[in-house]
Image (cartoon, rainbow, N blue to C red):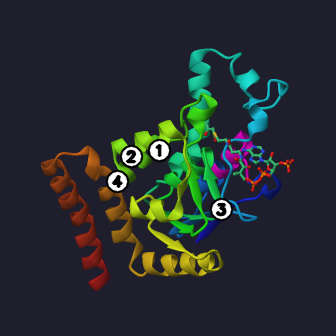
Amino acid sequence: MATIALNRPSVRNAQRPAMWAAMAQFLASLDDAVRIVVVRGNGGTFSAGLDLALLDPAQVDQEGSLVAIVQKSDQEIVDQIGDYQQAFALLADPKFISIAAVNGHAIGAGFQLALACDQRIATEDAQFCMKEPALGLVPDLGGTKPLVEAVGYGRALEICASARMVKAAEAHCIGLVQSVVPPHALDDAVTAAVRSLTAHGPSAVRAIKALLQQAPHRGSEEQRLGERMAQVDQLRELATRHR
Ligand code: CAA
């Protein structure tokens, strides 16, 4: 198991491009033996999202600052955001199952980071908010797709357009989080989830994660073909093990 802990508690784990680059590098370097990646926030908050200092017009020289980024061409901005999205995309790698352990607030980029994970376990005091529209921005770290997949288009639009806080109990009800636990029980809940998600051999679980990821984008026949092809590999592996 590997853990990514956001560690800027004095600014509620506000995120900066350097953190995304470090996360991407870390995730890309993980050994094949790692089956679970847990993402958490130190100090009682998951993450308050983008470091708002980057939107300050005085922050000219900082990497990722609004002032610096708008000097670039449209294509350069698209490419730069593409780099930022890498860490979020890598959390979907079928090699492992990613779990967001969400305590306190998950706002903006923090919400998107939680959404980038396969599973979300939240504390009873957790709150989720897609704050971007309130700042004149769109969620651009890969969060729109998993949000729609988790709660459906209508609810996703309402959550984003209103930029309201979604409390843990509602998040659980609408399928945004898999479980809600008292704050003191978060670590135990993560440990139990890790145990349960790694109870069986990695090969089949990895193949299933890939199949489930592909399911929404494929027709039924294509998905059935995908299942058959994945099963060929599993059957061969099983036979080799029994030899
Ligand atoms: N960036 C920089 N600093 C932040 C921050 C952020 N996103 N969030 C909090 N901080 C700082 C505060 O300025 C404060 O600093 P000082 O101690 O120097 O005053 C410190 O963290 C503590 O903050 P609070 O006193 O507000 O803490 P709280 O526990 O009462 O509230 C909170 C926590 C609800 C998360 C609140 O801090 C908050 O609303 N933060 C702003 C959230 C926000 O708007 N984030 C941007 C989302 S949009 C996005 O992320 C863009 C994108 O994806 C493209």
Give the label, 4 or 2, closer to the camera.
Answer: 2
In x, y percent, where is residue 240? 29, 77
Please provide the residue range marked out in magenta: 13-23
Marks 3 and 2, how far apart in space?
Answer: 22 Å
Residue ID for mark 3: 104
Q: Amino acid at mark 1?
A: Ile
Residue depicted at 73% across the width and 64% down the height = 42
- Tell me the crowding category of disc 4: few under 14, some 14 to 19, or many 20 or more residues within 10 angstroms, Cα based: some
Q: Is residue 95 visible?
A: no
Residue ID for mark 1: 159
Q: Nearer the viewer, residue 137 or 236?
A: 137
Q: Do residues under tags 4 and 1 come within 8 Å of each other at their CB atoms? A: no
In x, y percent, where is residue 127? 58, 57
28 to 195, vertically: above or below: above
Residue 22 part of the magenta-drawn span: yes
Q: Amino acid at mark 2?
A: Arg
Residue ID for mark 2: 155
Residue ID for mark 4: 213
Left or right, 138 with respect to 71, comes to left
Q: Do residues under tags 2 and 1 come within 8 Å of each other at their CB atoms? A: yes
Q: Nearer the viewer, residue 214 or 39?
A: 39
Give the label, 4 or 3, closer to the camera.
Answer: 3
Residue depicted at 47% across the width and 53% down the height = 92
Please, what is the dominant secondary structure of the magenta stretch?
helix
